[in-house]
Image: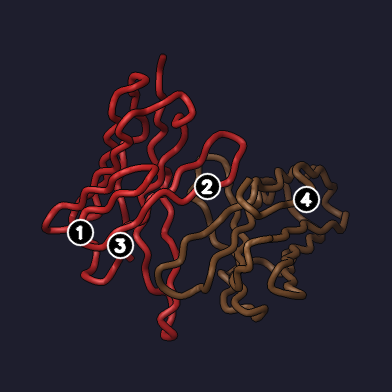
Chain colours: A red, B brown
Amino acid sequence: DAKTTQPPSMDCAEGRAANLPCNHSTISGNEYVYWYRQIHSQGPQYIIHGLKNNETNEMASLIITEDRKSSTLILPHATLRDTAVYYCIVRVAWDAGNNRKLIWGLGTSLAVNP
Amino acid sequence: ETGVTQTPRHLVMGMTNKKSLKCEQHLGHNAMYWYKQSAKKPLELMFVYSLEERVENNSVPSRFSPECPNSSHLFLHLHTLQPEDSALYLCASSQGARPHYEQYFGPGTRLTVT
């Protein structure tokens, strides 16, 4: 299974861009990269996902390197409410029926400071 | 509010008790999941239901028994638990358990086994 490596913690000043890195050097060609976050005392929340191309939505941007071995989640203007644990996940197949599951790691604890 | 509710939010039970966790989704999804989140460990997928049929049991001990009576409701029946089963139990739903699914999580049930 492809696995991901993230720094355990990061700090960011409010209003600045938060750039969260993720390494997934063993990712296969058809495996997607997903990002979720988990605010304290809540369940995880989907942010964005991508395969090869860069993606953007109302929450964040996802930059995937050309060799797909790493990616960066960008929160363009971090706010205090963005303080959370951010998970970079690779979605892998788990059975012959081509069903998939998310392989979760420990994530990066992002602290947005005033 | 993600559209996925879980009750109770907190539960303390003895090792000889029997209790049930309930999850309800109001999103019209057809796949539901139970996850376990222990301190300092990644999320562990326990069970997956797709179209009310269990499609995955991830080597979960028999003291955990899931039930999915319809596509909107999911239960986790608990009996003779161990202290190491104390954790946050998260329910999630998605539109299909196959590729490109975005999972919506409930707030979780914090379980303490004494």
Mark 2, Cα crowd under 10 Å, few <14 / some 14-19 / many 20+, is many
Residue nearest the observer in this picture, B3 or B76: B3
Proximity of marks 1 and 4: CB atoms separated by less than 8 Å: no
Return the mark for residue A44: 2
Please tell me whether mark 2 or mark 1 is closer to you in this view. Answer: 1
Please tell me whether mark 1 or mark 4 is closer to you in this view. Answer: 1
Q: Chain of mark 4?
A: B
Q: Can you name the residue that lies furthest to the bottom here?
A: A96
- Name the residue located 42 percent from the left edge and 26 percent from the top edge: A79
Q: Chain of mark 2?
A: A
Q: Which residue is mark 4?
A: B7
Specify the amino acid type for callout 2.
Pro
Please tell me whether mark 4 or mark 3 is closer to you in this view. Answer: 4
Q: Secondary structure at mark 3?
A: loop
Question: Is the same chain shared between marks 3 and 1?
Answer: yes
Quarter of the image holding residue B80?
bottom right
Proximity of marks 4 and 2: CB atoms separated by less than 8 Å: no
CA distance for labels 1 and 4: 40 Å
Residue nearest the observer in this picture, A4 or B50: B50
CA distance for labels 2 and 1: 24 Å
- Name the residue located 60 percent from the left edge and 73 percent from the top edge: B30
Among the two numbered marks 3 and 2 on one chain, the one whose residue lies closer to the N terminus: 3
CA distance for labels 4 and 2: 17 Å
Proximity of marks 2 and 1: CB atoms separated by less than 8 Å: no
Mark 3, Cα crowd under 10 Å, few <14 / some 14-19 / many 20+, is some
Q: Secondary structure at mark 2?
A: loop
Q: Which residue is mark 1?
A: A53
Question: Which quadrant does the C terminus of chain B fall into?
Answer: top right
* Location of residue A107 in the rendering, given as x and y in whole percent from the top left corner: 40, 42
Mark 4, Cα crowd under 10 Å, few <14 / some 14-19 / many 20+, is some
Specify the amino acid type for callout 3.
Ala
